[in-house]
Image (spheres, grey):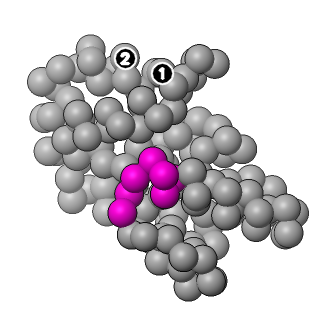
Amino acid sequence: MVQTGGSRTKNRFKKAIKNDLLKFKSFVIEPFSNELDLYHWFERIVSFPHFGIGIATIYLNRINPDLYPVMNNKTLIALNKIGNTLSFTKTFRNYVQVKEIQKNLIAEFPVLENLYKADALNHL
């Protein structure tokens, strides 16, 4: 139950990527490359309607839960509730801060193991 609500927009998303399927396919395989420019990738998320930052960062997290955190509304709300000061904008700067905060949580509570498990705390 980490990800819900996809059924609301799945048809709009499907229609949007069909308009330029090759561009989208190229985009989503980039994170598998060792030369990924994460900032540039992150900034291009807006090019794909209905593939927002929340879904895109969940996608990254599933590719590599040791490297990529999830950033969505639940993440930002939860991290603020435990004493962090994050804005609620979904910017690359905030994404980097989320990763730093969650890496610190993992260091303090090794049972979390990775950013996937650290994200699960945001859903309690």
Seen in the picture, residue 47 relative to 71 is either above or below; the reply is above
What residue do we see at 67% from left, 64% from top? 101
Measuring from the top left, give residue 64's x and y in whole percent.
Answer: 64, 38
Report the disc number at residue 26.
2
User: What is the C-alpha distance between the residues marked 2 and 1?
Assistant: 7 Å
What residue do we see at 77% from left, 63% from top? 104
- The residue to which callout 1 is attached is 30
88 displayed left or right of 117: left
What residue do we see at 47% from left, 35% from top? 39
Is residue 36 or residue 112 the one in the foreground? Answer: 36
What residue do we see at 35% from left, 37% from top? 43
Seen in the picture, residue 122 relative to 45 is either above or below; the reply is below
Image: magenta residue range: 89-95
Measuring from the top left, give residue 13's x and y in whole percent.
Answer: 20, 41
41 displayed left or right of 13: right
Residue 55 visible at all: no
Instruction: Give, as a three-letter code, the residue at label 1.
Output: Glu
